[in-house]
Image (cartoon, grey):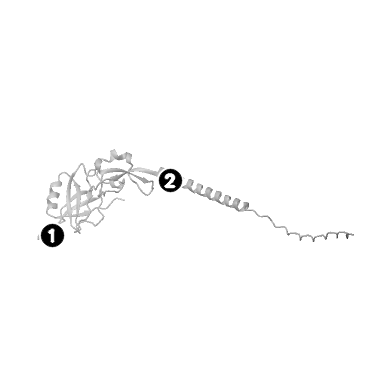
Amino acid sequence: MESPAAPPVPRPAAPARPDIPITTTAPVKQERRWSVAALCIVLAVLAGLGAAAAVTSASDRTRVLAVARDVPAGQALTDADLTVAEVSADAALTPVPAADKASVVGKRPSVDLRQGGLLTASQLAAGSGLGDDKQQVGVQVKRGQAPAGTLAPGDKVLAVTTPAQGEQQTGKDAEAPPSTLNAVVVTVSRPDASGNVVVNLAVADTDGPLLATRAAQGRIAIVREPRSS
């Protein structure tokens, strides 16, 4: 007789597995997206500011007159002497507007103009038309015979006749005041290597020949009269 089957032995329950949190990369990706978006916004703002600054800078530029070639003091300006340049507006500068070119042509600068420089109102104010209604004489003045670096167009001066070389005055002649001529400075050149300058003087019609004769002999010294305040 067969023995009854043994009842099945229950298997021990498997130990419960701890709950493992499920992680995803979504937050990291989302954070990166926000970083990229923020960076794009910053770059866009900077680009906009740069464009606005460029537009503002361009709008602040103005057309002015510049010197196209060297022009000595006292020489009438021609159309070819001037060109147009664009510069940023600056309250410290007073360049002549390009629109005034027609009115500037024919005027005489009071100082030497150098190629590439801006033409300013101060370079024309004193020298424009000065002495046109009088005789003008160019006087070469040696170093020490005129105030150094202080003569300017429009200055009233005395052209003083100095003794001739080797001439000695005695008695009453030595005490007599020197012969002088009233004149007005038209232009003053730059000093040469020896320090000599050429001063263009405007004088009365009757004084031109006499001044020219004395200047040719190198017998002219210049005394500047006091400037009015």
- Residue shown at 17% from the left, 48% from the top: 137
Say what secondary structure mark 1 lies in: helix
The circle drawn on residue 174 is 1
Q: Earlier in the sequence, mark 2 or mark 1?
A: 2
For mark 1, does the 10 Å Cα neighbourhood hold few (<14), some (14 to 19), or many (20 or more) residues? few
In this image, 81 relative to 9: left or right?
Answer: left
- Residue shown at 14% from the left, 52% from the top: 215
Q: Is residue 4 above or below residue 92?
A: below
Q: Where does residue 166 sit, x and y in percent of width and height?
A: 9, 61
In this image, 75 relative to 23: left or right?
Answer: left
The reply to whether discs 2 and 1 touch (Cβ–Cβ < 8 Å) is no
**Type of the residue with mark 2:** Ala
Calculate the distance from the C-alpha at mark 2 to the C-alpha at mark 1: 73 Å
Say what secondary structure mark 2 lies in: helix
Q: Where does residue 172 sit, x and y in percent of width and height?
A: 12, 59
The circle drawn on residue 48 is none
Q: Quadrant of the N terminus?
A: bottom right
Of 226 and 50, the residue lying toward us: 50
Of 103 and 183, the residue lying toward us: 103
Mark 2 or 1: the one toward you: 2
**Type of the residue with mark 1:** Ala
Quadrant of res 97: top left
Return the residue found at the far front.
1
Of 101 and 203, the residue lying toward us: 101
Q: Is residue 157 above or below residue 15?
A: above
Query: Circle 2 sits on which residue?
Result: 54
Return the residue found at the far right.
1
